[in-house]
Amino acid sequence: MSGLKKNLVSEFTTLQRRNLVDFKGKELPILQQAALLEINRSSLYYKPVVPNSDDLLIKMHIDKLYTAHPEFGYRRICAWLNRYDGITINHKATLRHMREMGIQAVYPRENTSKPNPANPIYPYLLKGLNINHPNHVWSIDLTYIPIHSSWLYLVAIIDWYSRYVLDWMLDDTMDIGFVLETSHNALKTATPEIMNSDQGSNFTSPQYTDIFKAVGTKISMDHRGRAYDNIFIERLWRTVKYENIYPQEYDNPREARIGINKYMKYYNHERLHQSLGYRTPEEVYFNN
């Protein structure tokens, strides 16, 4: 068989597997589709569960409260929701929502997002450090983004000196993929001397740390239970949410992506920061 013919057969076979049709163009039975895709047959019948509107409302209230008071644990958040927000909820349900949102209080407590014990924890390198130039220290974190129909997670990397957001990405899960992609994209701009994060499972994973170690960056991690070790990215989340997410009340993921993209451009290129002498993060990052 000629090389060209082999390629055509290979491409046709690939299309068959991808489109799950036979040589006559008819759709294959579910059992055969599952075998071709190497997945459980039941997953092909699965229909995503539409999030409960009451649960979404509770998560929105928790997010606003946690953004304003990251020191609150689930018991205090529960008490607040019952007393001030008119939401009847118990401690266990509050903790479940916070776990689904990927958030937790900043003081020592029952841990809701434990790193893999096999992954190393790196020391915190920023205590007393004079951060005096761009790319000296970067930070990465992710946060919960409420929308009417569901929710998203936002990951971002920020330069501490200039507050410049080097890269960011939205996803509908906290899987590590969008963290890795954001990290690779940020490194296309520059290489930091130190990369700081919390001790969440995504950031203790060698898949993440190896990206920065490979370019000579030192890894730094917040002390567990130490408030505001990652202060500048915590301030970024508060700014993004109070100036964009909460006022806009996005209806769906597409709308959120478009709106947040516009805001991030505004944040980097137009928003004046008092702490930067009323300059923009872009001016300080590129013109220091």
Image (cartoon, rainbow, N blue to C red):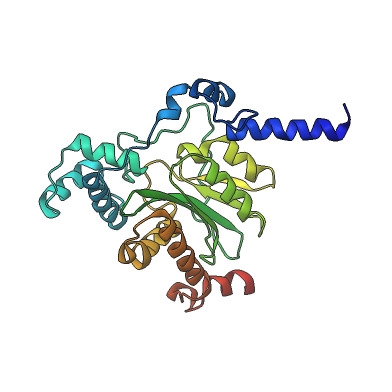
| Residue 250 picture location, percent across and down | 35, 60
Asked if residue 287 lies left or right of residue 257, the reply is right
The answer to whether 22 appears left or right of 235 in the picture is right
Can see residue 70? yes
- Compared to residue 25, the image places residue 64 above or below, namely below
Q: Is residue 48 left or right of residue 178?
A: left
Give residue 252's quadrant in the image.
Answer: bottom left
Q: Which residue lies furthest to the bottom in this view?
A: 278
Instruction: Quadrant for the N terminus, please.
Output: top right
Image point (63%, 71%), residue name: 286
* Nearer to us in this view, 167 or 252: 252
Residue 193 visible from this viewpoint: no
Instruction: Look at the picture and state if 24 lies above or below 157.
Output: above
| Horizontal side of residue 136 vs 155, given as left or right | right
Picture residue at 53% right of the left edge, 46% below the top:
178
Q: Which residue is drawn at 59% across and 37% down?
A: 207
